[in-house]
Amino acid sequence: MKLAAVAAAVVLAASACGNAGEDDGTAASGNEYEVVDNPEFPEGSRMAEIADDGSIKIGVKFDQPGIGFKGAGQENPTGIDPEVGKIIAGQLGLSPDDIEWVETISDNREPFLQNGTVDLVIASYSITDERRQIVGQAGPYYVTGQSLLVAKDDDSINGPDDLDGKKVCSVKGSTSIKTVEEEYGAQPAGFDTYSECVDQLLNGSVDAVTTDGAILLGYAAENPDRLKVVGEPFSEERYGIGYSPDAPEMCQFLDDSLEKAFSDGDFEKAFDATLGKSGNDVPSPPELDACDA
Ligand code: GLU
């Protein structure tokens, strides 16, 4: 009797391990990061305000496996971006339970930072000069490049030069849609989210989806029989952490927190539990931009 109960428990544990989310970086990482006890910050700084408040609002994606994902029934989002959020929160003296996760889509990241809907945006958010005119961006913590997702049986698209006249789906407010519109002769179809684009590709309404390779690998891993990522990356996307334009003091704090995570192994732990599972190579830590850049 006792043995049977043990056997049943083992079967349950095994099936939990085998669930689809576990391999594509959508399962909770279980990682724990340092939570600093009573951290000290300059009086009046945004860091001190957040630490005193005891909670932080972080904008992440909810539909990008491996990057930022929150499926039905999932309590908290998973992916490299929420993991980075937990690392940063820990340096503010906050535990994961003190984080309020807010869904951001590409097009509302700047407004959410400008109007205080969130304290930070960690959402596959490429650092660009244009964005830095209106919000703060620290980092980068990860570098990827724009790529293409096509149907597995499509041999006609192997790189951006094959996009001429093709219908290509991407997301409004992203660097990806801009690049494909401005530099290649594709017919762009702009949606709010990449998961909508993937649906368009699966139902044959578009010929390709374009955005960062790290994002596309996550979708391909969910649908390996029908989708593939093709070609070499054709842009450089440096993922940064967005902060309020009214709190420039956040920059050095965020860079210092990232530097620490690169050197003490926490970033690698975060990567292995998320993006590392959908076929992305473990990166060497990128060089951080100086805060007066
Ligand atoms: N990293 C690019 C960007 O920030 C594309 C991915 C996204 O839209 O989140 O625009």
Image: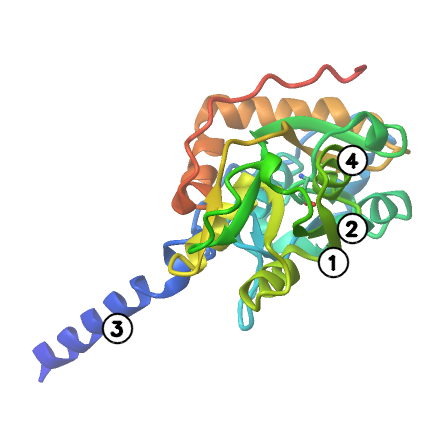
- On screen, residue 268 above or below 214: above
Residues at marks 2 and 4, CA–CA distance in whole angstroms: 14 Å
Which x, y percent locates residue 124? Answer: 64, 42
Q: CA distance from mark 1 to mark 3?
A: 40 Å
Q: Mark 1, mark 3: which one is toward the viewer?
A: 1
Q: Quadrant of residue 280?
A: top left
> On screen, 61 above or below 157?
below
Confirm or deny contact between disc 1 and disc 2 (CB under 8 A).
yes
Question: Which callout, 2 or 4, points at the residue further toward the start of the chain?
Answer: 2
Q: Which residue is mark 1?
A: 191
State which tag comes first along the sequence, 1 or 3. 3
Question: In this rendering, which labeled residue sits more in front, label 2 or label 4?
Answer: 4
Amino acid of disc 3: Leu
Alpha-carbon span between mark 1 and mark 2 = 6 Å
Q: Which mark is residue 12?
A: 3
Sequence-wise, the earlier of marks 1 and 2 is 2
Q: Is residue 111 left or right of residue 70?
A: right
Q: Does 41 sit left or right of 86 as displayed?
A: right
Q: Nearer the viewer, mark 4 or mark 1?
A: 4
Quarter containing the C terminus: top right
Classify mark 3: helix, strand or loop: helix
Location of residue 87 by image quarter: top right
The quadrant the N terminus occupies is bottom left
The residue nearer to you, when weighing 250 against 229, is: 229
Distance of mark 3 from mark 2, alpha carbons? 43 Å
Q: At 81% across and 40% down in the image, what residue appears?
A: 49
Mark 4 or mark 1: whose residue is earlier in sequence: 4
Q: Which amino acid, by three-letter code, is at mark 4?
A: Glu
Query: Is any atom of residue 105 visible in this view?
Result: no
Type of the residue with mark 1: Phe
Q: Nearer the viewer, residue 58 or 217?
A: 217
Indicate the amino acid at tag 2: Lys
